[in-house]
Image (cartoon, coloured by chain):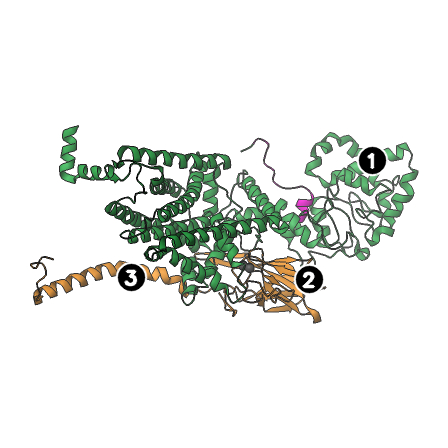
């Protein structure tokens, strides 16, 4: 380096100039970036829909032999600026367990979110993506299944012959069942 | 001309720049093996150009993304070609990236002092793959939608930052408008911007250090222009030729049915070059997913990045070649396993068939005169009897009934058939079977239910065989009149043609000659009999009322067998019952022959 350009004894005034230049530059660059940052991170504060009980099916519509049946969940879908009432927001498998209680499972695979299929012949749920299997009670069947937990069971209630489900999506890929 | 160029040159230094661009030294002379980098720049340029044009017509939003892509592909002049070019060039780019990487490693072009250049290359590889990943979602069809759910859920497995990262990328907890706006911003703005910056750096460094010659040099050095430029141009044309062939053969790029989170889609697969990752995940049981999804892929990528450092070691280059070879072999093996497994899985094959059917159907509906409603094309499929009818039938009716011998979707239900086969219900041939002593008590009509021993079967079996020619003729006329009550689309012409017969038949239906009216109410006339009311038999109104409540006194009343009252019991909505009825009646939109 040329000794003229880098004096061994930095002079005070030059130091202040440098500091000012850097600060001014940093402020000028930070403001637009920070302004965007809020919009970028806005989704973090947003909660997923669901949680409210929704009428899903007539109790009669669920086979009484414990075989699950798939139903769409109709509710108000909120998609950013749109609110659409009475449209499918997801789907559930309903089954009548022993003792007549109704079990509801979210159809979404807890591994990575595919739509699991019920295979009547094999009497289990099979995920068409990475082959996780779940028994009719929603528990992991094949221990080699990639899913970290069983199917997500949803709270149900039977009112006047109709099944109401608290529909909720859960975070995929986690051992614990955390609302999405 | 020359003075103009001089004028420009004095102000810009263009001459020096051009000289630098064209007269870069090619050690050992021009060679085909040096073309890969140029083909990649070419592909990227094609993507920028076609992408910008697509942008003119694309609208990210959950009710507009699929719709605008549909419009590009199927309505806009040359849209399919533009879209196809963008789609297949993206695929070509992935292949070329791999070839470029291989050539660089084989030729040892990553070694000092070119490490940083190599790293910008690896970064570019990752960036281009992210372009594919984000672009896959933009048409908002079932395939892109479900594949992206999987991809973003996998991102969420990343320790600590995963869930937050997922929410930021997805634009909230649910997939929708903001997923598209964000993916589009990444795909068309952020990632391409980064790519341009890194290509700049990559090319600058490449020029700074010069080409890595393949030893032994076969010929004398020569400048880039014209022979190497010629090689590069020919290679680019060859790439373009392959892409164009794919575009023409496929008539653009595929577009599935619109995304629907409530509709089962078992054909979800990522783009073919991500299949190895998809397959890899299958081997990691619950609790260890993070290894298959994040840790091992990241380590491998870091190792690819570390080749220049490993290469310093005495056997480093050989190790690198072995490592890269083994990794690519692994990728190829996993891809093959994924494809082979899918091919051998009947569920998957059926799912693909169903997906193709819906994709094709929605195109017909979208092109119908009524067009796509503001609520989006997804509503077209939800309201289509041809798509929903069979599904509803399979789920609700097929445990007893059949449709042409199957469950509506072409499968065999686990329960044995115990009620009529409803294919062609109320049509002339269907009624002929019902009034035929040989078939009336078969399982396809009344043989499976308790009506097997009922009055109707008895009447057919006892009376019809004794009919003389004129009674037979009367029965036929009455049958034609009854079938006309349904007003079936498939019989429209026949019904029009046979107006006279229908008039005669109608009189017979209410006369005591044949005796229908002894038990049934027919054409609103009744003799007080309790058998089902046949007024409007098989019409939409009759059928929906029957499915809603067969126990109603105008139908079977107390004598109803096992058929549930789907409407009255709240099992199905009015819309769903309507869809089943319309489907059974063959009442769905059919594009006019020869229409667009
Ligand atoms: S998403 Fe179900 S096994 Fe992977």
Q: Which one is closest to the eye, mark 2 or mark 3?
A: 2
- Label 1, ligand 1: CB separation under 8 Å: no
Query: Please, which chain is the residue tagged with disc 1 on?
Result: B
Q: Nearer the viewer, residue B174 or B520?
A: B174
| A49 left or right of B415 in image | left
Name the colour assigned to chain A in the rendering. orange
Give the residue furthest to the right: B466
Q: Which residues are magenta?
A: B578-594
Q: Pinpoint residue B395: horizontal percent, then vertical percent.
A: 67, 54
Foreground: disc 1 or disc 2:
2
For the question of whether residue B578 can be seen, the reply is no
Rounded to the nearest angstrom, the CA distance separating label 1 from label 2 is 45 Å
Residue in the foreground of this view, choosing between B468 and A115: A115
Q: Which numbered disc covers residue B476? A: 1
Which of disc 3 and disc 2 is earlier in sequence? 3
Residue that label 3 marks: A34
């Amino acid at each position: 380096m040329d000794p003229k350009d880098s004096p061994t004894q930095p002079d005070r005034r030059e130091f202040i100039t440098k500091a000012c230049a850097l600060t001014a530059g940093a402020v000028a660059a930070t403001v637009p970036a920070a302004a965007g940052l809020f919009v970028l991170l806005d989704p973090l504060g947003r909660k997923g829909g669901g949680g409210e009980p929704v009428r899903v099916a007539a109790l009669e519509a669920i086979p009484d032999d414990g075989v699950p049946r798939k139903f769409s969940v109709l509710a108000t879908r909120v998609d950013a600026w749109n609110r659409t009432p009475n449209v499918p927001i997801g789907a559930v498998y309903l089954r009548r367990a022993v003792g007549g209680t109704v079990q509801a499972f979210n159809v979404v695979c807890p591994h990575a979110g595919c739509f699991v299929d019920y295979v009547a012949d094999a009497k289990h749920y099979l995920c068409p993506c990475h082959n996780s299997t779940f028994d009719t009670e929603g528990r992991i069947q094949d221990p080699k299944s990639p899913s970290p937990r069983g199917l997500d069971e949803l709270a149900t209630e039977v009112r006047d012959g109709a099944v109401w489900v608290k529909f909720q999506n859960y975070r995929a890929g986690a051992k614990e069942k955390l609302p999405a | 001309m020359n003075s103009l160029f001089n004028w420009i040159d004095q102000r810009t230094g263009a001459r020096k720049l051009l000289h630098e661009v064209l007269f870069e030294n090619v050690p050992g002379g021009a060679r085909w093996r040096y073309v890969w980098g140029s083909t990649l720049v070419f592909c990227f340029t094609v993507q920028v150009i076609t992408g910008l044009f697509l942008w003119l017509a694309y609208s990210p939003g959950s009710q507009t993304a699929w719709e605008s892509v549909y419009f590009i592909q199927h309505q806009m002049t040359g849209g399919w070609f533009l879209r196809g070019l963008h789609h297949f060039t993206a695929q070509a780019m992935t292949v070329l990236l791999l070839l470029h990487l291989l050539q660089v490693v084989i030729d040892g072009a990553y070694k000092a002092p070119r490490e940083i250049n190599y790293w910008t290359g690896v970064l570019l590889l990752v960036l281009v793959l992210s372009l594919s990943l984000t672009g896959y979602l933009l048409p908002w069809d079932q395939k892109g939608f479900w594949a992206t759910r999987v991809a973003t859920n996998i991102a969420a497995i990343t320790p600590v930052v995963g869930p937050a990262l997922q929410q930021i990328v997805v634009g909230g907890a649910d997939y929708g408008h903001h997923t598209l706006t964000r993916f589009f911003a990444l795909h068309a703005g952020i990632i391409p911007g980064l790519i341009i910056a890194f290509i700049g750096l990559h090319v600058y460094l490449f020029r700074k250090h010069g080409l890595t010659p393949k030893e032994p040099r076969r010929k004398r050095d020569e400048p880039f222009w014209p022979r190497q430029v010629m090689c590069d141009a020919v290679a680019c044309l060859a790439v373009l030729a392959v892409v164009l062939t794919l575009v023409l053969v496929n008539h653009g790029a595929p577009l599935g049915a619109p995304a629907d989170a409530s509709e089962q889609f078992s054909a979800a697969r990522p783009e073919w070059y991500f299949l190895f990752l998809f397959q890899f995940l299958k081997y990691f049981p619950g609790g260890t997913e993070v290894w298959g999804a994040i840790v091992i892929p990241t380590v491998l990528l870091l190792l690819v990045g570390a080749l220049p450092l490993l290469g310093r070691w005495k056997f480093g280059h050989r190790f690198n070649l072995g490592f890269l070879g083994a990794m690519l072999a692994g990728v190829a093996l996993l891809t093959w396993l994924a494809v082979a497994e899918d091919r051998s899985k009947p569920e998957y094959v059926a799912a693909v068939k169903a997906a193709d059917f819906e994709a094709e159907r929605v195109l017909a509906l979208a092109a119908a005169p009524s067009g796509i409603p503001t609520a989006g094309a997804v509503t077209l499929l939800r309201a289509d009897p041809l798509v929903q009818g069979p599904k509803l039938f399979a789920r609700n009716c097929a445990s007893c009934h059949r449709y042409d011998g199957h469950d509506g979707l072409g499968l065999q239900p686990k329960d044995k058939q115990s009620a009529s086969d409803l294919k062609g219900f109320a049509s002339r041939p269907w009624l002929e079977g019902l009034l035929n002593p040989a078939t009336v008590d078969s399982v396809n009509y009344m043989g499976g239910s308790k009506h097997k021993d009922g009055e109707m079967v008895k009447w057919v079996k006892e009376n019809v065989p004794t009919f003389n020619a004129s009674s037979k003729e009367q029965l036929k006329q009455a049958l034609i009149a009854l079938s006309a009550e349904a007003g079936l689309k498939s019989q429209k012409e026949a019904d029009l043609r046979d107006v006279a017969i229908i008039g005669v038949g109608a009189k017979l239906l209410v006369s005591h000659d044949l005796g229908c009216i002894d038990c049934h109410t027919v054409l609103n006339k009744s003799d007080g009999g309790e058998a089902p009311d046949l007024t409007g038999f098989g019409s939409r109104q009759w059928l929906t009322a029957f499915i809603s409540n067969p126990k109603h006194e105008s139908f079977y009343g107390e004598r109803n067998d096992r058929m549930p009252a789907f409407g009255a019991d709240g099992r199905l909505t009015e819309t769903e019952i309507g869809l089943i009825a319309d489907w059974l009646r063959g009442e769905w939109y059919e594009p006019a022959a020869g229409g667009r």
